[in-house]
Amino acid sequence: GIQVEQSPPDLILQEGANSTLRCNFSDSVNNLQWFHQNPWGQLINLFYIPSGTKQNGRLSATTVATERYSLLYISSSQTTDSGVYFCAVQDSNYQLIWGAGTKLIIKP
Amino acid sequence: GAVVSQHPSRVICKSGTSVKIECRSLDFQATTMFWYRQFPKQSLMLMATSNEGSKATYEQGVEKDKFLINHASLTLSTLTVTSAHPEDSSFYICSARDRGTGSYEQYFGPGTRLTVT
């Protein structure tokens, strides 16, 4: 089956810093989603991005499907950005295959 | 838009009892809903896929007689954990696809934390 790898596993930054999270996948996928899981467990949809670049405020994402990776950029980090960021790809059955996540801690 | 609710958010039950968790799509119709389980510090594990009006499809290793899923309408799916035991304690999360958009994007509920004593 498709393997999804996220890096780094942990990231600690000062407020105001920028960060780049990476998601590599092992095979062609139908789609890719980025999520933020807040400390209470709620998964928040960030991007639904099979290819190309999207931006939403301080966040942007780029997926290069031909090279099987996606990047999530967070600029001017705030403490509320803390949590776990998951990348999940959709396989041929449109089911989500999850990465292990990147735990982000933003210090004030 | 695309809001999914879950009820209850937390439940504590005694070993041997059954617990029902509801998942609702509040502002869209969902022909397909998904149930996941998440262990501490891990990613989500798909338990089953439910389609409105038909039987759920369970992932390998998930006991369908223990985790009963009913998708009775386009906005409601329920997960019943029967004869719960402490090893069933976990964070259960549902998701739904919006049939109106034709997109395969999944929207997630806030989760239900189950503790079996």
Image (cartoon, rainbow, N blue to C red):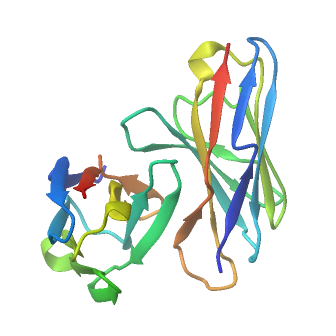
Q: A65 or B12: which is nearer to us?
A: B12
**Image point 48% across, 59% down: which residue?**
A95
Q: Position of residue B91 (x, y in %)?
A: 56, 37
Check the picture and name the quadrant holding the C terminus of chain A.
bottom left
Q: Position of residue B90 (x, y in %)?
A: 56, 30
Q: Position of residue B89 (x, y in %)?
A: 60, 24
Q: A83 or B111: which is nearer to us?
A: A83
Q: In the image, is residue B17 above or below residue B105?
A: above
Look at the image and tell me whether residue A88 can be seen.
Answer: no
Quadrant for residue B83, please give it.
top right
Quadrant for residue A71, please give it.
bottom left
Question: Going by the image, does A18 lie left or right of A4?
Answer: left
Q: In the image, is residue A98 above or below residue A71?
A: above
**Image point 61% across, 22% down: which residue?**
B88
Residue placed furthest toward the right: B72
Q: Position of residue B78 (x, y in %)?
A: 78, 46
Look at the image and tell me whether residue B7 can be seen.
Answer: yes
Question: Going by the image, does B83 lie left or right of A89?
Answer: right
Q: A74 or B23: which is nearer to us?
A: A74
Q: A54 or A37: which is nearer to us?
A: A37
